[in-house]
């Protein structure tokens, strides 16, 4: 197993811990961004890293940055279910046109989730 794969598995574990340690939410988000940035320096076209950093930025409320990374993964041809779900979540938070995010949600239905990626948090009550 490659070093990058191990690092992505660790990122996913750390991401899950954010929910158990909400007092350390900002610190853990900063660690996630730092680690994903380092992975992207080594492998700029690493789809799981792009999708995950997009999810983290979405969770931080930085939707423009999130969209940037998610669109990069899309342009690279990622077929990961979490990519399409995350794109929809970011577009909903950005209050984009409904057709745009519904299209991503429809596309996500037939996709398979990459075990190295995760979904952005979505709170339908937040807007």
Image (spheres, helix red, strand yellow):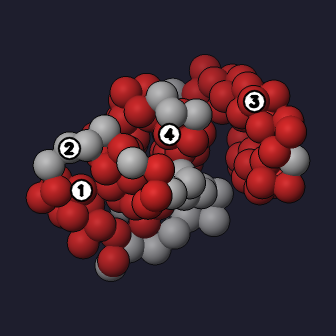
Which percent across, then down, holds residue 118?
59, 57
Which percent across, then down, holds residue 91?
30, 46
Which mark is in front, 1 or 2? Answer: 2
Q: CA distance from mark 3 to mark 1?
A: 27 Å
Q: Is 76 on the left-hand or right-hand side of 39?
A: left
Going 14% across and 49% down the picture, which residue do you hit?
97
Callout 3–callout 2 Cβ contact below 8 Å: no
Tag 2 or tag 4, which sits nearer the N-term? Answer: 4
**SS class, disc 3:** helix
What residue does disc 2 label? 96
Can you tell which mark lies on residue 58?
4
Tag 4 or tag 1, which sits nearer the N-term? Answer: 4
Going 47% across and 50% down the picture, which residue do you hit?
126
Q: Counting other residues with Cα less than 10 Å from the Cα at mark 4, is it few (<14), some (14-19), or many (20 or more)?
A: many
Q: Is 26 on the left-hand or right-hand side of 55?
A: right
Tag 1 or tag 3, which sits nearer the N-term? Answer: 3
Question: Residue 56's image quarter?
Answer: top right
Q: CA distance from mark 1 to mark 4?
A: 15 Å
Callout 4–callout 2 Cβ contact below 8 Å: no
Tag 3 or tag 4, which sits nearer the N-term? Answer: 3
What residue does disc 3 label? 26
Which one is in front, 57 or 20? 20
Q: CA distance from mark 4 to mark 3?
A: 13 Å
Tag 2 or tag 3, which sits nearer the N-term? Answer: 3
The answer to whether residue 10 is visible is no
Q: CA distance from mark 3 to mark 2?
A: 27 Å
Q: Counting other residues with Cα less than 10 Å from the Cα at mark 3, is it few (<14), some (14-19), or many (20 or more)?
A: few
Going 78% across and 54% down the picture, which residue do you hit?
19
What residue does disc 1 label? 101
Q: Tell me the quadrant of the picture where the N terminus can be found.
A: bottom right
Q: CA distance from mark 1 to mark 2?
A: 8 Å
Q: CA distance from mark 4 to mark 2?
A: 15 Å
């Amino acid at each position: 197993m490659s070093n990058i794969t191990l690092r992505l598995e660790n990122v996913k574990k750390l991401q899950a811990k954010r929910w158990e340690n909400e007092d350390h939410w900002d610190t853990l988000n900063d660690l996630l961004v730092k680690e994903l940035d380092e992975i992207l320096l080594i492998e700029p076209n690493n789809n799981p890293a792009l999708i995950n950093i997009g999810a983290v930025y979405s969770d931080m409320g930085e939707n423009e940055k999130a969209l940037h990374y998610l669109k990069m993964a899309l342009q690279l041809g990622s077929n990961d279910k979490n990519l399409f779900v995350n794109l929809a979540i970011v577009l909903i938070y950005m209050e984009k046109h409904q057709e745009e995010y519904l299209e991503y949600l429809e596309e996500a239905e037939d996709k398979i989730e990459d075990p190295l990626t995760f979904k952005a948090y979505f709170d339908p009550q937040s807007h």
